[in-house]
Image: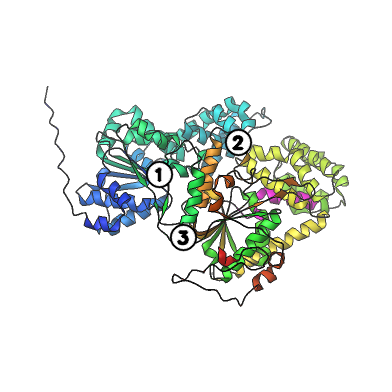
Amino acid sequence: MPKTYRIDEAPLREVDTEKYRKALNGEQLDVLLHGDGPCLVLAGAGSGKTRTVTYRVAYLLERGVATSDILLLTFTNKAAKEMTDRVTDLVGTFPKGLVAGTFHAVGNRFLRIHAGKVGLQPNFTILDQEDGRDLMKLAAKDLFVDGTAKRVPSASVLSDALSFSRNTRRPIQEALDMKYPAWEPFAAQAEDIARVYRDKKRIANAVDFDDLLELWLELLTAHPAVQESLSRQFKYVLVDEYQDTNTLQGLIVDKMVGPTKNLLVVGDDAQSIYAFRGATIENILSFPDRYPKAKTFRLVTNYRSTPEILRVANDVIANNTRQFPKELKAVKKPFAKPVVAPAANADEEAAFIGSMVAALEREGVPLGQMCVLFRATHHSRALEFELMRRGISYDYRGGMKFFERGHIKDMVAFLKLVQNPRDQIAWMRILGMFAGIGPATAGRIADRTTQLESLSLVRAMPVEDLLTPKSRVGWEDVSAILRDLGKETKPSEIIRAVIKGGYSDHLEQEHENWRDRLEDLEQFATFAEKAKDVESFLTDISLKEDYGAKRGKEDEQGDRIVLSTVHQSKGLEWDVVFVMHLTDQGFPHPRAYEEENGIEEERRLFYVAVTRARRQLLLTYPVVAGYDKLTVMQPSPFLGEMDEDAVERMTIERGSTLDGADDASDADADETIERDANGDPVPAKPKKRGFLSDVSDL
């Protein structure tokens, strides 16, 4: 039997570390110099984690590590490019051979090489989300071609539930129960559809995004030779945003670690906020248990926010029990305490924010350096109207603007039919929602309504000769809603009648985010409670839509305030941040009270919101909600977790500054603003205004 001789690796060369000591702080330098073996880097918000990772890669290359020996996993292509570009700048040449990319991109790379081992040809194609949904729809049709299943989840719902199941390694039934409980009894059929879906992909030599991860893990578990080859090739594995990994990605990372166990994961457990996508905080929390010899580093020097903002962030996150305790420390000089401002209702909250934005802009703060954050998209409705009224341009992140959302347009179409039963465009939109009614059938029905003056006549209209067997079921659903519409006259009551009459079932069947859409509609109904009749309400909406569209086009400078969900804001920062609708039923989300560890995730989400602010932080909430029926709201429990002297309590007065955009824009226009050596406003004494504290006090 021949003997085996293994060649020892050449030792890494020593390098002058002086330039690194000048470029990095002590915490970052410690990671760079001692990042061998299993390492957990807990990188707090604004602590320079990207800088630390890229300098670590550059340091390894300078010491003689081959580029092909390094694997850098990120969550976005943008992050991978940014890190590669920074490494290029540091070492003076592009690191050819360095494998850096998203989990999916790297998985694709390995599958192309080893395709045959997982039943693929190397020229396999990758299905995007839309392609995957289309193929899922075909799989469902193959199983229910006889029409025996009256209610079947949409391809979108099936795709989302199956993806959640695969990434979290949970059974489909459990995934349905967690995300779509109404469809949990459909689990057996969903498993059958998933099987047919898999078969269709294999026949087509195609994979979806989840396959890129699942098949990569299969390579590492079912083929020991491949696992050994890859783990030996990559002597250094670095993972960015480790707190956002899901169970599947966590298993892949553990399998990719070679004998040297040079695994450096960077993340912040306090910013783990994507459980709804399948991410699990357990990967980062259990790292020391899985790697008992792991070294833990803490990056807590914050270069983004003022000490006052960090004090609030530290106060709140300290209440989480499942975490690695750490306290962020500010580099910036003190500026102003965060403001907590309760408003009488949502309209006054919006007016306050709009007035403050206008005042700050007058003081020289660009709109693009201001942001308003909210937990859910329906929280922004009143603020959007207020900004339109004031002519303040805004960009919307995390979804579409309120009246651009499909479910809002659906509801407006129902209202239009109440006002004008001959509106063919509204008919085409509504009929197209329901099963079996295609464009041709919808067109014939809409044509017949043009001679009718009221919905009562429409309800009595004969349509049997226009229907096919498949469209008859859909028309029955439409008719049920039309019957309910005849009982109501107020816009708010009509909206709620449509929701109860079957539209909520339609949302649940068709959309993975159906709960958020229902909450939008309830906000829409609440807003409609102010309207006296359908005609005036629709007129008001139309004018607001037109005004919003014109406002966007007229903004030649492109300077807009950002409106964003907190989830969409992660990784971003602004000089001034408002966090709105901080009620106990708004933030945290109501579902969090029922979910295991739900409140802790919501508290992390609030922490992310707070740490987006560089200089000023304003926290607002309405005291009551509704118009006809008022509901007293309690402030978010997170507001009660701050030290009383850490924030400034502000009372909003309904003065001229909040009553009209013109008054707010002109108020104290000639006031001289004193600034310090850094160009920052010097706090002034309070003056009598529409709110008790002057903007300069912020």
Asked if the residue at tag 2 contacts the one at tag 3, i.e. Cβ–Cβ closer than 8 Å, the answer is: no
Which quarter of the figure has residue 551? Answer: bottom right
Q: Amino acid at mark 1?
A: Gly
Q: Is residue 137 left or right of residue 5?
A: right
Determine which of the numbered discs, if any, sits on residue 593 in the image: 2
**Residue 257: x and y, percent?**
30, 35
Residue 406 belongs to magenta span: yes
In front here: 447 or 159? 159
Q: How many marks?
A: 3
Camera sees residue 385:
yes
Residue 133 belongs to magenta span: no
**Label 3 – label 2 distance at C-alpha:** 36 Å
Q: Is residue 478 left or right of residue 16?
A: right
The dominant secondary structure in magenta is: helix
Earlier-in-chain disc, 1 versus 3: 1
Mark 3 crowd level (few <14, some 14–19, many ≥20, 10 Å Cα): few
Please tell me whether mark 2 sits on a helix, a strand or a loop.
Answer: helix
Q: Residue at x 33, y 53 (%)?
A: 84
**Residue 99: x and y, percent?**
31, 46
Nearer the camera: disc 1 or disc 3 = 3
Mark 1 crowd level (few <14, some 14–19, many ≥20, 10 Å Cα): many
